[in-house]
Amino acid sequence: MLCEQARDHLSAYLDRELASELSVAVRAHLESCADCRALLADLRATAGLLGRLPVHRAPADLADDVQREIERCTILPAAEPGYDAEPQERTLALRRVRLWPRVLAVAASVLLVVGIGVLALLGPAGRRGRLDVASGPETVPVLGPPAEHGAKFAKDGEIGGGVGSAAALAKKEAVSDYKADDRRKGGALEVKEGGWDEGRTDLAKVPERARAGPSDLEHVAKAPGPDSLAKGTDLGTRLRAAEKPSGDELAAVQQVQRAMNQAANGEVPIDELRQVATVDNLKRTGYNNTLVIETDAPAEANKDLTRLFLSNDWQPVAPPPAAAGARVERLAGAKDKSGAPARQAAPNGYYFLAHSDGEFVWVVIADRDYITRFSSQLAAAERLRVGNGSGRQFQAIRTLQDEVRLYNLSQSQVVQGGGGTAGASGPAKGAGEARYPRETEVSAAAPAVPAEAARREVISKLGTAQVTGGNAYAPTTGQVAAQPSQAAEPAQAAPQVKPALAVEESVAAKTRAEQERAGRANALDLAGAAPSPPAEGTPEALEAIAVHGEKAEAPAAALAVPTLQRPAPAKETGDRVLAGGEQKAQEEQAASRTQAAPQARAAPASKALAERDGRATNGTFSYMILLPANQELLVIRVQRPGVSADVTATDAAEDAEKPTVESGH
Amino acid sequence: MISRFGTSGGPADSELVSQVVGGDGAAFGPIVERYQDRLYNTVYRMVGSAEDARDLVQEVFVKAYENLASFKGTSSLYTWLFRIAVNTSLSHRRKRKWVRMAGPAADPGDGEAASGWTDPADGDPAREMLAAETEAAVQQALAQLDDEHRTVVVLRDIQHCDYREIADILGVPTGTVKSRLHRARLLLRDKLQPLLKA
């Protein structure tokens, strides 16, 4: 036997996995070949190293976690007193509830996030009423970054500058809290301070018969659920509103539900999903016209979702830009603080805005990791010239960032139980400011406000709880609005918000301002140089739909937010990326950065956010987060107070006090 | 094979499976107890993170529970569970492959303390440190392998599966197992030269 032959068999020889004849031949060769003996010794030593590795045993409570998870999957937790829903309907609730813990189980993992934001842009009161009836009062902001990213936020203070510096700390704490809680409670989410309450089922109350059995869609068990679910879930609300689907409608819901589940598991072709995922059916699912398709291929998801919407009479708001989508991927060139590429295998990110019959759906397909890391990448992106459409991509992320922040604000607002609504368009005024303090702080971040004063104002409005680690996702707003006196005591909170930040920022302010100007010019150049967008409806267009806004009312304000009814004071026209208001704000911001960089940096996006808030106050905003590893879908909805004519303010406040995560396939 | 996983004294896997499928969910408990440590250690070595391993093993069991009715018994339950575990781990890694795998020293997680040293440090801090460094180095080397190589070497050299078991778990011929394992060991040898010489 030659060495070359023998070597191929050495591992198997070592493992005694060779046939006897072959083993004899190898042994004979080894006796005469020192090199092969040496190699065999190496292989043995290598295998020995592995074999001597310590055995890591499963955590002691893993079995309990598994049992809890399985039980959760087989228990219907949301039964209301007297509720006697049809089995199929209970199944829907079952599927929603079961998802959440596993979402948390991978919360620290970097997974794909498919978010679909449904922004019901409301004008007519009648529309509001209709939408609101269809939506629930539940509210839970959830996009919590992993703790390490939260730390980055806090350190960099880049989430909206001064706002972010405080919010970042809060987020960090929040994330830590929920992760800790998650671990302690075996996977359940239960954030303090009334923030989240996933509504864990008390197993002790669950009938024995509900604890066993496979947990597929067909399995239905009924058991008493926690109060939070009973009162706060969409299911409960729909039941109270006598919106129980029945008959054909129920069948349609089931059909869609199953199709979603199956598609999520790759069990059915997407075409089949399209056939059933009509707008009406989607509405019937209670998902507020939202749809998420499970995928770990964002590009395909983008195509599918886009086509899906188009095939169901949802149209892109504007012709897609030539930049072929808001591909966040392009931002992969961002560097982290160490100078290493922040993301080599960057996720794709897409979003598009579509409308149908006056309703606007904001669809976001992005990577959760990106969302949670946008602070650093965003900063890097400002200094990047990442090619055609970079400005749009940047804005896409900024918008996403704003939306995440918006959750915090709205959650806060909801907790207060607010009453009336702000105007249907334009910045919120009066009561709107009170409910959305960030609007004010954003304004305060304008250049005329001295840095420290602005910062203190921001801090005071954020509330001490956030600054010191309150749950940014949970409603600290009670403190925000309920403690106006904090504004008079800024010094108390200010030092806790990374006081060095302003100094650090001031050093880099001039450079950054220059860079931003360059970036803006670059974006303009790119926009001007961009090829013509593909014809609407063409495959190219379908795939290219991405970041855009209305072309009529506010063409230049396109990217900041889905701004259909916002009379944006755009200075620029055409395909420009930056809204006029934003540009102005940015110029002001750049000028003021030497003194108030953290706050000022929040101005442009936040200003758009503030404008949108006024309108969004009247709407429902939803996210759906899809985690492909678990084939699970998390639905988070924010019901803004004053939206529903059918839900009293008391109800809204009550529900908001027990925000509920609703999840489902 | 089953005896390796401590089933002595308990009901057979097939019996437990039948009970669970028949509606006795409690019968799944012994299955979890029986295989959790092996699965955990395997997954841990696959993903390099105790936290992830915990979540993934939980996921594996939930998947198994949900799909137990589809378990036909043509292979052993152990093989079936490990197949799920391997696929789940690989899927997890593919989704976060840019995340550097953390060695045990950096990510002790919440798993039980290492208990399988054949060369225990006997409380000697220096030896303990060396052991931890060795483990971290090996784990790091594992993390650098391709999925197929890491999987086969973990199953063989850490879980001590025989070639046929590995072939069943991975759904590949035993010849493939043989060649992959040999290649994986050669790669590891190159990466671990300092340790081997030491």
Image (cartoon, coloured by chain):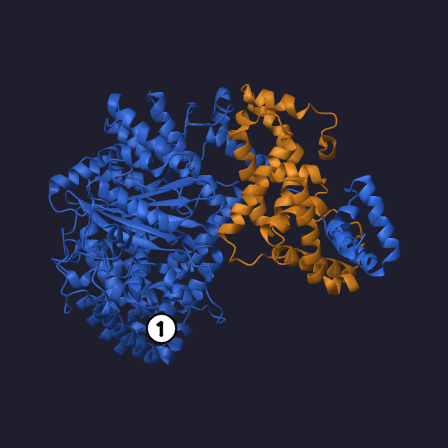
Residue B75 screen position, x and y as percent: 63, 29
Rendering colour (chain B)? orange
What residue is at 77 percent from the left and 42 percent from the top? A17
Residue A622 drawn above or below residue A207: below
**Taking A66 as reference, is A219 left or right?**
left
Query: Which of A494/A353 is in front?
Result: A353
Seen from the viewer's position, the closer of residues A342 and A414 is A342
Instruction: Say which residue label 1 marks.
Output: A383
Q: Nearer the viewer, residue A621 or A36?
A: A36
> Would residue A74 be visible to someone looking at this image?
yes
In the image, residue B148 above or below residue A377: above
Q: Is residue A257 above or below residue A150?
A: above
Q: What's the chain of the residue with tag 1?
A: A
Residue A240: x and y in percent read 26, 28
| Badge 1 amino acid | Arg
Image position of A492 (left or right of B5)? left
Q: Which chain is blue?
A: A
